[in-house]
Image (tube, coloured by chain):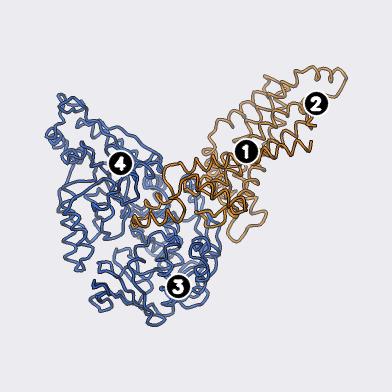
């Protein structure tokens, strides 16, 4: 709640549980509740708000027998307490979106509560706080909400068993080095296989590999571990010794155009660049096909996906024709194109210096675009300069290469809606490219409030057709999580989204040595 | 002597005050702040969230105001909280400082144990086979990149021979002295090999210079034993430049051991300050760097006092 770091989410997955979460199948599922509330099953109902607007009341019932690892029961009051902490402006909660939408949480009894939301949106049943241990934590919050971020029980005494309600509880921690988890004796669900799980933090990837090969660690988590090229290299060196799992997910690698620049503000130039980039070869040659080419900003596993959109296969001839039409011509093949005034078609691309994968992609693009007469200059910056100044300040000339993270069926308001274009030097949205299309704005507004799945999917399709036609960004590929696992380990299912594999740790197990080896190594 | 020490301590306090502002300003002027980094990690972060968080952490204030707030709190003993560790800054730094002192101290002692006899032996027999062998070893140590050496050590001693653990400070559930020494071995060897070459070169050069001096000839003419001439006369004088270099090396508490700490998962100052700077943990980075500054200054004071002991002609009275 107070920190968005993926590593913390990974750790919390072992010992905490949200009420609902997207599963490895990308379907919303109950983790702590007995039944997922929907309008269809009557557990969610529209309600009129005092101001005349329409809200929604969503009823959840917690599973029987849920308790914190100190034996105290998990109750509706813990959910309501989490909401009170989350919505308080001084507690330092990173994202208050879901807390701010909740008008009230009504406690029906210890296990049943009703979440009253101030608007009707498609994700109404995913808008529920993760419980906090009120019996342990409330003193710190009551004393001084402004100091809660430093005084909360998770930071003050992280091994207190009363903080955890998952299959495991943290028993010791050396911050920045390792955390040790043991079974939670009060976990009412499926008994986890392992007595103890130790999570180690190793920052250097070469040391990580050495630790793996020496047996100091058994597995490397795909969520936070090695990059895909490192895992592919490891698989080449040790194909049989370990199993490897790759899961393309919701990290959308793309090139953001500066649409205020007259050169790349011209859609013909953007399309020419798309046709002139051999993205399929990038995916196959650099990533062994494990990171598939993105058609647009919606993942193929997402319900809103469609491939019935304008596509840009590698076609240098078409790219050249588009550049000619845009007024960028060259007299001889191989030369940089110029406009009518003799100004060369010289574009800059920026990304995070030191990111080997992105730097490799840049070099391939430089070579591809050179073939269509575009002189590409690579100007990279350290990540904190690139994100902290260049991207957020909208201070790049033509192209910026980076990734967006999202959740399943996440409406791209922050990155595409025109009201999310930040003014230079101001804190604002994340539409850094400056894309403004009234039809897209309207579709985003509608799809957030459309509860009918089919109609919402249709709105998505309309949006994606416009996106692929306008090409405000050049889609590159979907980044994959790469897991390195021991061959004896079963049940680790990469999700590809923000919910980590550890949320299903009770399904992890040891392969029966007598069973036929059906591992999906290399899959 | 006492007034000299007091004077130097006052100077140290003044330098620390100036450095605190310089470091604070440098960290504060770096592009991006903690909230900018959060935006990249959380797609749900709205503009309102960003503004609220910037206000909460005081990042909407001018740099000078933020520094003044920090300074007034620090003078009252409140050095703030680490944003990354959600703990008081000193609670984070003290144990890590101890870990780094253990690591650097062991490597320092081992380096001296190797460098002094090797440097003296090489200096007394210049251009001999022994001198060439020592020089070769010293240059090899200086030339090998520390990160590569560390990885080689892990592959050899942890992966292949399985003599030592590949990283960490203790095994879970263990933590006894033997377990700690077992984990300490590889990082100490890596740091020692990376530093010993340089010290050998300093000792050799200083000894060769000392051995050319008139007082050495006089000592020999007086009939003193070779051992006494070398140890009591030559080495004592040769140690003055070596002590200077070693004192300056205290800055290694932050920078020098960073790679070793990162690769071996050793929870020390270098890794902590590096993470703090990258993670925009202002309070932690500031105090970590001030610790390193203070230690370097105090080590130099100790070196100055050592000069008087090594060379009777030097006096601070």
Q: Chain B is drawn in which colour?
A: orange
Image quarter where the N terminus of chain A lies is bottom left
Could you say which quadrant of the image residue A23 lies in?
bottom left
- Residue at 61% of width from left, 35% of height from top? B195
Q: Colour of chain A?
A: blue
Element under disc 2: loop
Residues tagged by mark 3 and mark 4 found on one chain of the structure: yes
Crowding at label 1, few (<14), some or many (≥20) Cα neighbours within 10 Å? some
Q: Where is residue A366 in the image (x, y as percent from the top left)?
A: 27, 34
Q: Position of residue A282 (x, y in %)?
A: 27, 42
Residues tagged by mark 2 and mark 3 found on one chain of the structure: no
Residues tagged by mark 2 and mark 4 found on one chain of the structure: no
Element under disc 3: loop
Number of the front mark, 1 or 2:
1
Residues under labels 2 and 3: Cα distance?
A: 76 Å
- Observer-nearest of B268 and B6: B6
Disc 2: which chain?
B
Q: Do the residues labelled 3 and 4 touch (CB within 8 Å)?
A: no
Number of the front mark, 4 or 1:
1
Determine which residue is flagged by label 3.
Answer: A191
Determine which residue is flagged by label 1.
Answer: B15
- Observer-nearest of B168 and A515: B168
- Observer-nearest of A219 and A353: A353
Crowding at label 3, few (<14), some or many (≥20) Cα neighbours within 10 Å? some
Residues tagged by mark 3 and mark 1 found on one chain of the structure: no
Disc 4: which chain?
A
Could you say which quadrant of the image residue B312 lies in?
top right
Q: Where is residue B317 in the image (x, y as percent from the top left)?
A: 80, 32
Seen in the picture, residue B302 relative to A493 is either above or below; the reply is above
Determine which residue is flagged by label 2.
Answer: B313
Residues under labels 1 and 2: Cα distance?
A: 29 Å
> In the rendered view, does A262 fall on the left or right side of B27?
left
């Amino acid at each position: 709640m107070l920190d968005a770091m993926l590593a913390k989410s990974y750790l919390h997955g072992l010992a905490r549980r949200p009420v609902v979460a997207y599963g490895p199948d990308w379907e919303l599922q109950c983790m702590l509740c007995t039944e997922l509330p929907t309008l269809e099953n009557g557990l969610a109902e529209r309600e009129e708000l005092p101001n005349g607007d329409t809200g929604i009341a969503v009823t959840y019932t917690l599973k029987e027998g849920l308790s914190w690892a100190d034996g105290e029961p998990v109750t509706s009051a813990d959910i309501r307490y989490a909401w009170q902490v989350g919505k308080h402006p001084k507690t330092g909660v990173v994202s208050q979106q879901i807390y701010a939408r909740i008008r009230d949480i009504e406690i029906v009894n210890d296990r049943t509560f009703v979440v009253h939301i101030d608007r009707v949106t498609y994700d109404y049943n995913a808008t529920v706080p993760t419980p906090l241990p009120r019996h342990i934590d409330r003193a710190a919050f009551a004393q001084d909400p402004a100091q809660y971020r430093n005084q909360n029980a998770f930071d003050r005494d992280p091994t207190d068993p009363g903080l955890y309600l998952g299959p495991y509880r943290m028993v010791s921690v050396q911050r920045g080095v390792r955390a040790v988890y043991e079974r939670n004796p009060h976990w009412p669900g499926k008994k986890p296989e392992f007595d103890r799980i130790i999570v180690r933090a190793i920052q250097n990837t070469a040391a990580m590999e050495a630790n793996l090969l020496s047996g100091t660690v058994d597995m490397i988590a795909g969520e936070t571990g090695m990059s895909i090229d490192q895992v592919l290299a490891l698989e080449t060196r040790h194909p049989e010794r370990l199993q490897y799992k790759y899961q393309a997910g919701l990290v959308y690698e793309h090139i953001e155009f500066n649409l205020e620049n007259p050169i790349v503000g011209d859609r013909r130039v953007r399309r020419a660049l798309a046709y002139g980039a051999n993205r399929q070869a990038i995916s196959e040659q650099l990533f062994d096909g494990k990171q598939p080419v993105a058609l647009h900003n919606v993942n193929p596993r997402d319900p809103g996906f469609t491939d019935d959109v304008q596509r840009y296969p590698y076609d240098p001839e078409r790219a050249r024709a588009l550049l000619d039409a845009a007024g960028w011509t060259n007299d001889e093949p191989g030369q940089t194109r110029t406009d009518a005034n003799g100004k060369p078609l010289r574009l800059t691309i920026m990304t995070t210096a030191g990111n080997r994968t992105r730097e490799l992609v840049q070099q391939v693009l430089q070579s591809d675009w050179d073939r269509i007469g575009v002189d590409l200059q690579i100007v990279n910056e350290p990540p904190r300069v690139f994100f902290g100044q260049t991207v957020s300040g909208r201070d790049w000339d033509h192209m910026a290469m980076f990734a967006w993270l999202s959740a399943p069926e996440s409406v791209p308001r922050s990155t595409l809606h025109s009201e999310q274009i930040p003014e230079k030097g101001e804190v604002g949205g994340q539409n850094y490219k400056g894309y403004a299309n009234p039809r897209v704005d309207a579709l985003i507004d509608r799809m957030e409030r459309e509860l009918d799945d089919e109609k919402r999917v249709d709105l998505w399709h309309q949006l994606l057709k416009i996106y692929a036609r306008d090409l405000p960004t050049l889609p590159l590929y979907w980044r994959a999580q790469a897991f390195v696992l021991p061959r004896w380990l079963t049940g680790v299912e990469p999700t590809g989204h923000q919910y980590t594999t550890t949320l299903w740790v009770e399904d992890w197990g040891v392969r029966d040595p007598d069973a036929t080896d059906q591992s999906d190594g290399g899959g | 002597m006492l007034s000299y020490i007091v004077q130097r301590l006052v100077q140290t306090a003044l330098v620390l005050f100036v450095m605190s502002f310089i470091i604070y300003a440098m960290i504060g002027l770096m592009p991006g702040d903690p909230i900018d980094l959060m935006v990249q990690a959380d797609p749900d972060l709205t503009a309102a969230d960003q503004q609220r968080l910037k206000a909460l952490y005081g990042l909407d204030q001018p740099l000078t105001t933020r520094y003044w707030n920090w300074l007034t709190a620090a003078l009252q003993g409140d050095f703030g909280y680490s944003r990354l560790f959600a703990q008081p800054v000193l609670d984070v730094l003290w144990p890590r400082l101890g870990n780094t002192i253990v690591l650097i101290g062991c490597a320092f002692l081992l380096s001296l144990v190797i460098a002094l006899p090797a440097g003296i032996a090489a200096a007394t027999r210049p251009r001999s086979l022994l001198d060439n062998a020592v020089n070769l070893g010293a240059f090899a140590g200086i030339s090998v990149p520390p990160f590569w050496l560390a990885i080689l050590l892990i592959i050899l001693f942890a992966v292949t021979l399985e003599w030592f653990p590949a990283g960490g400070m203790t095994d879970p559930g263990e933590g006894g002295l033997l377990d700690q020494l077992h984990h300490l071995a590889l990082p100490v060897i890596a740091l020692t090999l990376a530093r010993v070459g340089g010290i050998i070169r300093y000792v050799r050069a200083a000894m060769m210079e000392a051995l050319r001096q008139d007082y050495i000839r006089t000592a020999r003419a007086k009939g003193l034993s070779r051992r006494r001439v070398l140890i009591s006369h030559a080495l004592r004088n040769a140690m003055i430049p070596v002590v200077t270099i070693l004192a300056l090396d205290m800055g290694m508490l932050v920078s020098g051991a960073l790679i070793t700490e990162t690769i071996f998962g050793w929870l020390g100052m270098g890794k902590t300050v590096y993470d703090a700077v990258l993670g925009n943990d202002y309070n932690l980075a500031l105090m970590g760097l001030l610790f390193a500054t203070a230690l370097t200054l105090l080590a130099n004071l100790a070196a100055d006092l050592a000069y008087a002991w090594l060379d009777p002609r030097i006096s601070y009275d």
